[in-house]
Amino acid sequence: MIRSLRRKFILIAMISLVGTMAVLCTAIGIGNHYITTNRVDHAIFLLRQNGGIFLPPGPRSDPSNFEFQITPETPFETRYFIVELTAQEEIKSVNLDHIAALDRQTVADTISQIIDTRAKRGYVDHYRFGVFPEAGGGNTIIGLDCFLQLQSANNMLRVTAAIFLSCVLIVFVLLLFLSKRAIQPFVDNLERQRQFITDASHELKTPLAILSADMGLLEDTYGEDKWLESARSQIIRLDKLIKNLVELARTEETIKEDAVTCFSISEVAQANVDAFQPLAKADGKELTAEIANGIHLKGVQDNFFRLFSILLDNAVKYCDPEGTIHLAVSLRGRNICVSVSNPCIGVDTTKLSRYFDRFYRADSSRARSTGGYGIGLSTAKAIVIRHKGRISNHYADGVITFTAVIPQTS
């Protein structure tokens, strides 16, 4: 349980970190791309506004402004071309005075790609273009070389990704070393609770034994009495409850190596079926089983005797009159699947997940009549989790099924 808690702590922390970092890195990437594109579009707009040239810079602009800033070096460091098209989208004129990397044929191919996009602005290769309609029909296309800007944005993206991966790796390593210390207070509290239950059970056994003996003496002295009988039944009930609590506390402990053996879970299941057959028949119900032969498991054998006992006892108690209880044990890949099903009308499907909570009883009146405490399924869950498995339940067509899946090499 402690290992499972530690893994969950690390998993939740890593998911939170990865989610936050992913949002942050995505925002940085999108923001950087937006700023770069906005600056280039502003440069294209200035070229359009000024007739294809950059006018000398005016008064010093606000450096925090994300728009394109013109400096004395801007006309020499900015590479662009201007193409005029007729209304029939034929090239009318080409201005390559401010770019050396393109010839007329390459520009024609680039313009063809721009026309095919049918967009007013966008990217073709590493060129950002803007399409401006003319009064007499036709268009003017201004294309600006954005190789350096896009290269800078890509480098920024790579650096951000590297930082993201580094942060995730560093935090994961730190969590591996510090998670044990982080959950230690919970572990200590859990151990104190278990110790309290064990100590309290030992302390309560003596007064319960004395009370039981006193009840016997009173019955010998005054004869049978309904009040004495009621008191004795409550003593028996309390003694059974204490034993169940101690059992639950013990099943939640980490498995010790000397308690682990390799045993046949098929034989354990069959032994429990044989034991519960008379009880089911006496209650007017039928118990059937489908158990695969030769399934072995490495674990605590007594725990699985208890697991089958809990599931079958629960099925017999809550099965509808004259219903059929079915136990199935099979091997699915490297997992052992155990399922117990029985008809049970009137189950509230919204509360199925609470069946494994301690002291929870779906029908209190019925639980009292069957002697239930709401601890059995909690113990079953603790046993399955103790062996690195999972247990669940579902309800369909009036039949409730409890299913436990345990790794065969647990």
Image (cartoon, helix red, strand yellow):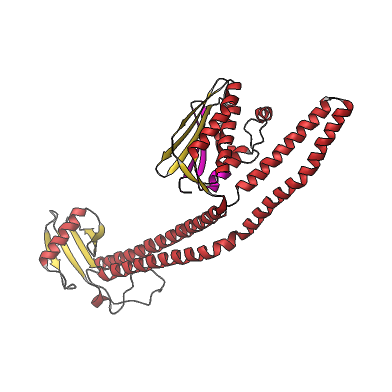
- In the current view of this chain or complex, which residue is farthest to the right? 221
Vertical comparison of 302 with 233: above or below: below
Q: Count the marks.
A: 0
Q: Nearer the viewer, residue 200 or 303?
A: 303
Q: Taking 397 as reference, is 199 left or right?
A: right
290 or 238: nearer the viewer:
290
Q: Residue at x 48, y 60 (%)?
A: 17
Q: Is residue 315 visible?
A: no
Q: Is residue 230 magenta?
A: no
Q: Position of residue 265 (x, y in %)?
A: 49, 39
Name the residue nearer the viewer: 184 or 159.
Answer: 184
Direction bottom: furthest residue: 72
Residue drawn 51% across the image and 66% down it: 174
- Decide if residue 367 is in sight here: yes
Query: Is residue 402 depicted above or below 166 in this figure?
Result: above
Q: Which residues are magenta?
A: 381-410
- Looking at the picture, tell me which residue is in the foreground, 198 or 105: 198
Q: Position of residue 377 (x, y in %)?
A: 59, 38
> Residue 226, relative to residue 260: is it above or below?
above
Please tell me in which quadrant of the rendered image residue 167 appears. Answer: bottom left
Name the residue furthest left. 105
Q: Position of residue 21 (x, y in %)?
A: 45, 61
Please tell me whether residue 409 belongs to the stretch shown in magenta. yes
Q: Position of residue 326 (x, y in %)?
A: 50, 28
